[in-house]
Amino acid sequence: MCSGGVSLLVVCDVCGLRGARVFQAYSGLRLCGECFVESVRSRVWGEVERWGLIEPGDSVLLAVSGGKDSYVMLESLALRYKASRLVGLSIIEGIPGYNREDDVRTLVDFAKSYGVDVVVVSVRDYVGLSVYEMVREARSRGLAESACTFCGLSRRHIMDYYARMLGASKVATAHNLDDEVQTLVMNMLRGDIVGVLKVHPLSSHPEGGVRRVKPLRKIYEWETAAYAMIRGFRFQETECMFIEENPTLRAKVRVALYEIERESPGSLLRFLEYFDELLGSVARGVEVRGSTSNCTRCGALTTRGRRLCKLCELLEGISLREPLYVKLRLNVKSRRL
Ligand code: SF4
Ligand code: ZN
Ligand code: ZN
């Protein structure tokens, strides 16, 4: 947890009626559960409207993992937008101990209580191998690709496929403020200007043609945790066995940013606000996709000049030349939600 915390025996600074439960260090406010939850929702809606993340006529595929952030995104959007315009997508990576059936059932039931359907799909059914099986294959061949590379590329492929199949015009992911600032700083440190631009909500960087949006990008991670606790969500808390394989630069940046935020609450939020303002005029309408071509094996969009998309290429390294999705993709017919 970054900044903020729980306090007792103090009246809420907003309603003045109920006891405060949350100290919002960056604003200096002590809030009761209701006012805190309301403040998170209204900031999510404000960010969505400010940048047109969801516009009239949009249908949105919500990438929901079952973690606390995805519950917060699901609830706050379902309270604002018609359920018929939203559909969830939950991807089962196939990692022992991580993907629990009861967590998926809880998520599906929760979404259903708001009228939102969730498509549950496993990496194994889409690719032919689970993430764990891909990693095992890679290790047996002495390859160094991390589990997160197999996992991330498979999930992106699946999201793109289902977005097109279900006719979604946007894919929403539950990245929070901490994630967003970490990505921004990492891209700056690498000198990756395209990566920096991609963080801006006005830049259009469709993966496979469908634009990605991040409704929680101004909500701290500690806030999604507090929201989930106050609302009593039964979210998935198990950690993936491959978590240690996450890029070390992100881990280092995360630690440094938390230290800065602890000493000066609100730093991450101010940094992202500053970035949004600074690049607002540059990023507006910028297509960061670059020129693309289609993968000669599965047809997915990929960088111009590549014969195979990154996932097909990665799978070729473990001798999987006919992943299941090749047939699926050839038969896909887009439709509107
Ligand atoms: Fe996938 Fe890596 Fe996250 Fe595990 S830690 S779920 S392998 S991205
Ligand atoms: Zn209150
Ligand atoms: Zn491909």
Image (cartoon, grey):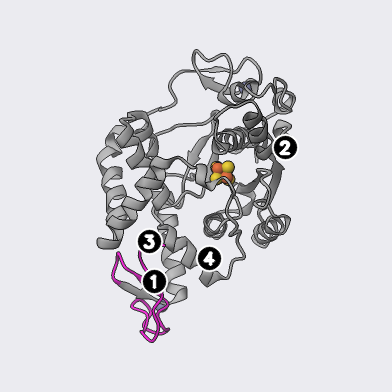
**Marks 2 and 3 close (CB-CB < 8 Å):** no
Q: Which disc, if any, is residue 2?
A: 3
Answer yes or no: is residue 58 visible: no
Residue neighbourhood size for the residue with mark 3, other residues' Cα within 10 Å, grouped as few (<14), some (14–19), many (≥20): some
- Give the image location of residue 91, x and y in percent: 65, 44
Q: Amino acid at mark 2?
A: Arg
Q: Amino acid at mark 4?
A: Ala
**Marks 4 and 1 close (CB-CB < 8 Å):** no
Chain-order first, disc 2 or disc 3: 3
In which quadrant of the rendered view does residue 164 lie? top right
Residue neighbourhood size for the residue with mark 2, other residues' Cα within 10 Å, grouped as few (<14), some (14–19), many (≥20): many
In front: label 4 or label 3:
3
Along the viewing direction, whichever of 151 and 215 lies nearer the viewer? 151
Q: Which disc, if any, is residue 228?
A: 4
Residue 202 lies in the magenta-colored region: no
In front: label 2 or label 4:
2
Residue neighbourhood size for the residue with mark 1, other residues' Cα within 10 Å, grouped as few (<14), some (14–19), many (≥20): some
For mark 3, give the secondary structure: loop
Q: How many marks?
A: 4
For mark 1, give the secondary structure: loop
Q: Which disc, if any, is residue 124?
A: 2
Q: Ligand 1 is in which quadrant of the figure?
A: top right
In front: label 4 or label 1:
1
**Marks 4 and 3 close (CB-CB < 8 Å):** no
For mark 4, give the secondary structure: helix
Q: Amino acid at mark 1?
A: Gly
